[in-house]
Amino acid sequence: MNNAHHYEVDLTWTNDRKGTISSPVLNSSIEVATPPEFPKGIPGIWSPEHLLVAAVNSCYMTTFLAIAENSKLDFVSFDCKAVGILEQPEGKYMITTVLLKPVLVITDGHYAERAMRVLEKTEKACLISNSIKSEVKLDAVVRVVHA
């Protein structure tokens, strides 16, 4: 049985340090550019660095949703901030670390420890995190609110 999946992304250079990415299976495109920290970079446009951090963060969310459902974990809300740290170890640019800061809100404090285990399991199961060299760190918070 072949479990390979393919995700096609097309890029067209538009001008300067900008281009547009799209996919034949998606309805929208994204303008991308060199980030402003680099020569001729353009502020206010998604960069490859933002997209890499977004890939980790969005994969974390979708993995969490699947694991929470399978674990029958009820929650009120889920938000996650992600920060990528760009450094130059050994003279090469790379995102060395992606810090994930999920905040999970639940209504029953008896499930707080279980909720934290689900968040931790999610980090270990995220396929994008498992596919990159960057270290992915988790700084998770479980909040209990009473309905």
Image: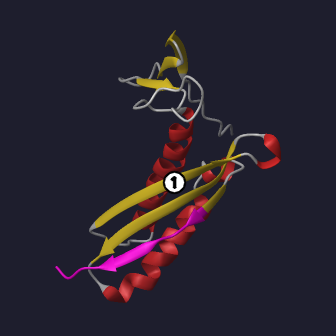
Looking at the image, residue 84 lies above or below residue 9 = below
Looking at the rendered structure, the kind of residue marked 1 is Val
Magenta stretch in the rendered image: 137-147
Residue at x 45% of width, y 32% of height: 46
Toward the left, the furthest residue is 147
Q: Is residue 2 visible?
A: yes
**Image coords of residue 40 (percent x, y):** 55, 22
Nearer to me, 140 or 75:
140
Q: Secondary structure at mark 1?
A: strand
Residue at x 68% of width, y 37% of height: 2
Position of 145 with respect to 53 (left or right) is left
**Image coords of residue 36 (percent x, y):** 51, 32
Q: Which residue is mark 1?
A: 83
**Image coords of residue 129 (percent x, y):** 62, 53
Position of 57 with respect to 28 (left or right) is right
Quarter of the rendering containing residue 103: bottom left
Q: Quadrant of the N terminus?
A: top right
